[in-house]
Image: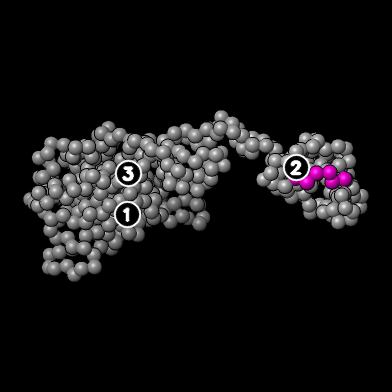
Amino acid sequence: MRSVEQHLSAILAGLRPLPPFEQHLLDAHGHFLAEDVAAERDLPPFDNSAMDGYAVRLVDVLGASEQNPVVLSVEQELPAGVAPSLIELEPGTCARIMTGAPVPPGADAIVPVEWTDAGAAAEGSVRISRAPGLGQHIRTVGEDVRSGQVVLTEGTRLGARQIGLLAAIGRDLVAVRPAPRVVVLSTGAELVEPGTEPAPGQIHDSNSFTLATAAKEAGAEVYRVGMVADDGKALLDAIEDQLIRADLVITSGGVSMGAYEVVKETLGRLGTVEFVKVAMQPGMPQGFGVIGPDQTPIFTLPGNPVSAYVSFEIFVKPALRALQGLATREEKAETAVTSESFDSPEGRRQFLRGRLVRSADTGEHAVTRVGLASGSGSHLMGGLAHADCLIVVPEDVTRVEQGEQVSILRLESA
């Protein structure tokens, strides 16, 4: 039986990042950078005003107040968005300036228009009733970004703020990793689509919906195929039909030890998909390998809904990161105090559905197992829907006492 770490290592060893491609900024949104991005110019590219007001020589306005205003001659008009001939300020003069306009030589501060009479007292002059500090309200060249500075590193996810920065430094194209295209299907003759009335012995398919949305939340482009009957040829045909648009395939069901395990029987004969037992609960039966001419990775997850979801969190999500050229995330170790005592099977890492509650007194998190009214079986979805974390109990721990610290794995979509 493999450990969780051994199985994850075997998966990641067989994966390679998807090739990058260039995208325009809006199309690059949500993707991960495949390059370091350096600025080709300073930002701001020139000294400019942060306020509407007057560019002044500080020495000319020192001591200005409401009781003793300073009157300066307005010799220049500097709007934003144009490149006027900048004239050096002479003593006793100033320039009327708009936000974003270049600061003229000799000016070392901006007086906001609110600190003046806006030229109302006499045409061609302005009355200033308050002095700024040295450099106040001037955005200096390169104070935000310097030319040659790396502003975003490879692996950065491009959200609104990062896209804005790229636009500000003049980039319209960037190299990104594509979102992995994931095909999701369920197997089982007992499955029917939600919205239809199940016949005796049938149940609604939930796995393909759970796994498809989990893959979306992990940044993938997802194609839900739905259910495939318990027939080897039908399974292979369904998978092969989808390979043209798949970077990764996920199936659920048909991998246990019993009869009619069509996924295990069919894909096992190909010799490229390995089926193993992993020392974990839920999710012990696992399969992973490649299929088709492009050696497309395929995960064959257990059919029980909780087993399938936990398997996705532990194994598939890191694989999706690897396809996007991202390092395996070192999850920050989080702990919480258990609100109850419970047993755990020896030799298996247990992942229990939990819910966190922060103590108003200590600020610490306490965690409670959820879904226990009807049991903790891996077919029970009610508790999973209300969980916001997984309680992780190591293989060598058989008893957890109330008040003990335990490791938790947060569920990002909770």
Q: Which residue, given by chain and number where applicable, does mark 3 sit on?
A: 180
Q: Position of residue 43 (x, y in %)?
A: 61, 37
Q: Is residue 103 visible?
A: yes
Residue type pointed to by label 2:
Gln
Q: Is residue 86 left or right of residue 298?
A: right
Q: Amino acid at mark 3?
A: Pro
Q: Which residue is mark 1?
A: 213
* Numbered range of the magenta stretch: 73-78
> On screen, 155 above or below 208?
above
Residue at point 32%, 44% (across, down): 180
Residue 370 drawn at (x, y percent): 32, 58
* Quadrant that contains the C terminus: bottom left
Asked whether the residues under the numbered discs 1 and 3 touch, taking CB atoms below 8 Å apart as contact, a structural biologist would say: no
Disc 1 packing (10 Å; few <14; some 14–19; many ≥20): some
| Among the two numbered marks 1 and 3 on one chain, the one whose residue lies closer to the N terminus | 3
Residue depicted at 88% across the width and 45% down the height: 72
Q: Nearer the viewer, mark 1 or mark 3?
A: 3
Identify the secondary structure beneath mark 3.
loop
Dot 2 or dot 1, earlier in sequence: 2
Q: Does 128 sit left or right of 167 as displayed?
A: right
At mark 2, the secondary structure is loop
- Circles 2 and 1, Cβ within 8 Å, touching? The answer is no
* Circle nearer the N terminus (3, 2): 2
